[in-house]
Amino acid sequence: MDLKVDIFVRNMETTERMETYATRKVSKLDRFLNDIEEARVDLSHSKSARSSADRYVTQITLRGPGYILRTEERADDIFAAIDAAVDKMQRQIERLKGKRVRGRGDGTPASEVVQETIPAEVEEPPVIVRRKKFTLVPMDENEALEQMALLGHENFFIFFNANTNAVNILYRRRDGTYGLIEPDLG
């Protein structure tokens, strides 16, 4: 089954070589996870990046039944950014599937390895140390942007969207733009 890869480009010119390279690399992820429904690759160039090694950004998003996996990598070359993002996505897929492919590295076969019984440490569940309650005032997205700035919230802002009658989360992205999360009870 061939995986269809959607490629989106921002702040840079795309070439046939670049699209072919990204499509070929990302479509190989289908070998590791064969129920991928949607694969999206976002390629962008940031002229204002602090370091020249962070100029090219590759984001890969995979959607399937019950999961969404996303990686973002930066490099000084778009092809290096694509390679790094694909490698990172492979590790996420391994984690999703619960497999650890990495071996012992010394060439010793598993039949010769003697496992020592190590008592497993009981991990404490995370503890909620603070709770906040606040009243959500209906507002539109522009008002939420203003409130976010007025309150000094730099990362995110939760509000009740008067246009959609739902709770939304407004957040600042790494590139200085804003994103909006619209939860859907499904």
Image (spheres, rainbow, N blue to C red):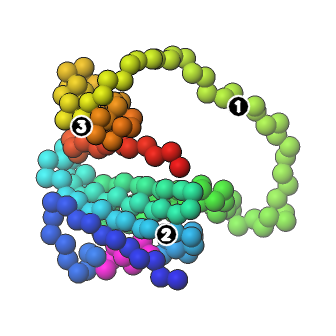
Residue 81: image tag: none
Q: Dot 1 lies on which element?
A: loop
Mark with earlier residue (3, 1): 1
Q: CA distance from mark 3 to mark 1?
A: 41 Å
Label 2 with label 1: CB-CB less than 8 Å:
no
Mark with earlier residue (2, 1): 2
Q: Which residue is pictured at 56% across the width and 62% down the height?
A: 65
Q: Quadrant of residue 85?
A: bottom left
Q: Quadrant of residue 41?
A: bottom left
Q: Which residue is pictured at 39% across the width and 61% down the height?
A: 60
Q: Dot 2 lies on which element?
A: loop
Other-residue count near label 2 (Cα within 10 Å), few / some / many at <14 / 14–19 / ≥20:
few
Other-residue count near label 1 (Cα within 10 Å), few / some / many at <14 / 14–19 / ≥20:
few
In this orientation, which residue lies closer to the viewer: 9 or 108? 9
Label 3 with label 1: CB-CB less than 8 Å:
no
Q: Which residue is pictured at 33% across the width and 41% down the height?
A: 164
Q: Position of residue 176 (x, y in %)?
A: 21, 41
Q: Is residue 181 above or below residue 33?
A: above
Q: Main secondary structure of the magenta part?
A: helix
Residue 37: image tag: 2
Three-letter amino acid code at the position of disc 1: Glu
Three-letter amino acid code at the position of disc 3: Glu
- Write down the residue under mark 3: 141
Tell me where the magenta segment starts and ends, as one range.
20-27
